[in-house]
Image (cartoon, rainbow, N blue to C red):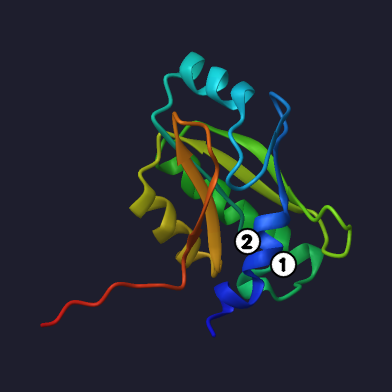
Amino acid sequence: MSSFEKFRSNYEQAIYVVLNPQLNLHVGVFNPSLQVFLKEKNTQQWAMITAYNPGSTICTASKNRFMNGQLEQLLHKDRFRFHEAEHRDPKGLWPVENSFFIENIELERALALGRKFGQNGIVAGDQEAIPLLFDCTFRETTGD
């Protein structure tokens, strides 16, 4: 069982919060406020990515802040529009993870960023405004 599959139900139950504007997103659930936001911003594709707790292994607060700072610098360097966000465990058993809601990022690029920062998965979507969970640990192989 992959590390993604091991924690999948936790990821599916988490609340993904964009801080400004305040949007509470749930995997697989249409969000009309998100749809309005995406249309206003002319955002075709989006993703929520964190660098906190790679591999779903709890890290120190200082390491998490450092890694998320690295992710933020990369987003600035690549000129993405993004918003501060958080991943929250509704049961409060897992610490809140600071993250970023990134506008107009292609899924493959978002998955690559998730992998770069050791994440098992990311949440992403399009103008349909239904957040979807994607496995960063899965890599397609060719028959070469």
Residue 131 at x, y = what percent?
A: 55, 42
- Residue 67: which numbered mark, if any? 2
Give percent across and percent down for residue 22: 73, 27
**Tag 2 secondary structure:** helix
**What distance separates the C-alpha of mark 1 from that of mark 2?**
6 Å
Please say if the residues under marks 1 and 2 sit with CB atoms less than 8 Å apart: yes
Left or right: residue 142 compared with residue 106: left
Residue 82 — which label?
none
Quadrant the C terminus occupies: bottom left
Establish if 115 lies above or below 42: below
Q: What residue does disc 1 label?
A: 63
Look at 45% across and 57% down and name the residue there: 113
Q: Secondary structure at mark 1?
A: helix
Q: Nearer the viewer, residue 108 or 125?
A: 125
Residue located 42% across and 19% down the image: 42
Say above or below: 66 vs 77. Answer: below
| Image location (x, y in percent) of residue 89 | 80, 56
At which x and y percent is residue 86? 72, 45
Q: Residue at x 61, y 74 (%)?
A: 55
Outermost residue on the front side: it is 29
Based on the displayed image, in which of its 4 quarters is residue 11 positioned? bottom right
Q: Which residue ends up furthest to the right in the rendered image? A: 92
